[in-house]
Image (cartoon, rainbow, N blue to C red):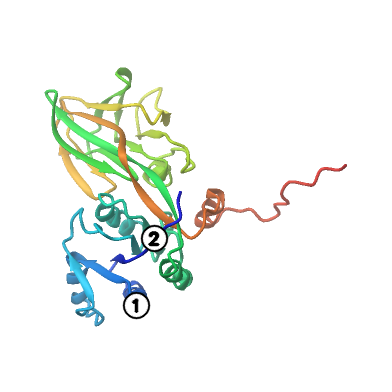
Amino acid sequence: MTEQAATHRVLLVVNPRREQARSALTTVAEALLSSGIEVVVTTEDRDDLLGYGWPALDGSIRVVASDEHAADGADVVVVIGGDGTVLRAAERARHSGAPLFGVNLGHVGFLAEAEPEDLSEVVDAIVQRRWVAEERMTLDVRILTGGSVMQSTWALNDIALEKSARSRMVDVMVEVDGRPLSRWGCDGVVCATPTGSTAYAFSAGGPVVWPEVQAMLVVPLSAHALFARPLVVSPTSVVALELGEGSVAILSADGRRIVDVAGGSRIEVRQDPRPVRFARLAMAPFTDRLVAKFELPVSGWRGRRAESG
């Protein structure tokens, strides 16, 4: 976690379907440009913004390709939208290592740093070159057939191997570190990072894992088995999911990258050496974020009482 030294270019990623997001984008872009900072958007966002009649796109804003190199040369990526927009921005930023500065305009917005009322504070932090970077673990995912890697992808939140036919379960053999653990007839299996522990894995009954804990979660979905508890394994572990010959499934990474998986395939999940970085205004306790986002009942808390002498 380090303080940043200089800011010269900022990539903006936005949910263009929300009028509030388009308005916030205009505010941020104008403030950054007036401070002499280069503002960049991707062709994907430019086309969507023009479709919604956004008037602020002119020659002062640079347009780059919508690929993994979009954030190359950027010091920070400002994301205006919900968690889905943050996950899309992560695809653009991960190669460069530029941190994501999220402004939540979605529902829960667990991945965002700030709320709309904090927009000016985010802009000031960027202009004054003052924020703290936090690294989040990602997953490397490989799909093998006959021992050969056929496809690969990655995830910040999670990967979900799920049945593709509503009427049929999938047969999954779970292996950890080269040893078989159990076989599940189930709707699927989620493998998640600590960041993703508050997403799909949480909905499926998995535990919430503090971000600084390096671990990987394995959470079965509606498994018909005696042993089908959520698992927390070492970040150095390799989790393999072997799909039964008669099963057909789909694999989704962060709900964005979708792959059809044939029966007999093997999916290997391990920690990816490249993290995704987030920009924070300050390193606040994760407990406070959890309470705020889930609106947990904490009224009446007295805290630790002073020890009597």
In the displayed structure image, the side of residue 147 where residue 1 appears, left or right? right
Instruction: Place residue 109 in its image quadrant.
Output: bottom left
Q: Which residue is mark 1?
A: 23
Q: Which residue is mark 2?
A: 101
- As drawn, the label of residue 32 is none
Instruction: Place residue 147 in its image quadrant.
Output: top left
Q: In the displayed structure, would residue 151 be above or below residue 11?
A: above
Q: In the displayed structure, would residue 282 be above or below residue 41?
A: above
Q: Nearer the viewer, residue 156 or 78?
A: 78
Among the two numbered marks 1 and 2 on one chain, the one whose residue lies closer to the N terminus: 1
Q: Measuring 19% from the left and 45% from the top, which residue is drawn there? A: 258
Q: Residue 236: x and y, percent? A: 36, 28
In the displayed structure image, the side of residue 260 where residue 180 appears, left or right? right
Query: How many residues crowd mark 1 within 10 Å: few (<14), some (14–19), many (20+)?
Result: few
Q: Residue 157: x and y, percent? A: 35, 45
The furthest residue to the top = 179
Q: In the displayed structure, would residue 166 be above or below residue 27?
A: above
Q: Residue 209: x and y, percent? A: 47, 40
Residue type highlighted by circle 2: Phe
Q: In the displayed structure, would residue 208 be above or below residue 178?
A: below
Residue type highlighted by circle 1: Ser
Q: Helix, strand, or loop for circle 2?
A: strand
Q: Is residue 165 visible in this depiction of the protein?
A: no
Quadrant where the image shows the C terminus = top right
In the displayed structure image, the side of residue 51 where residue 159 appears, left or right? right
Q: CA distance from mark 1 to mark 2?
A: 17 Å
The furthest residue to the bottom = 55
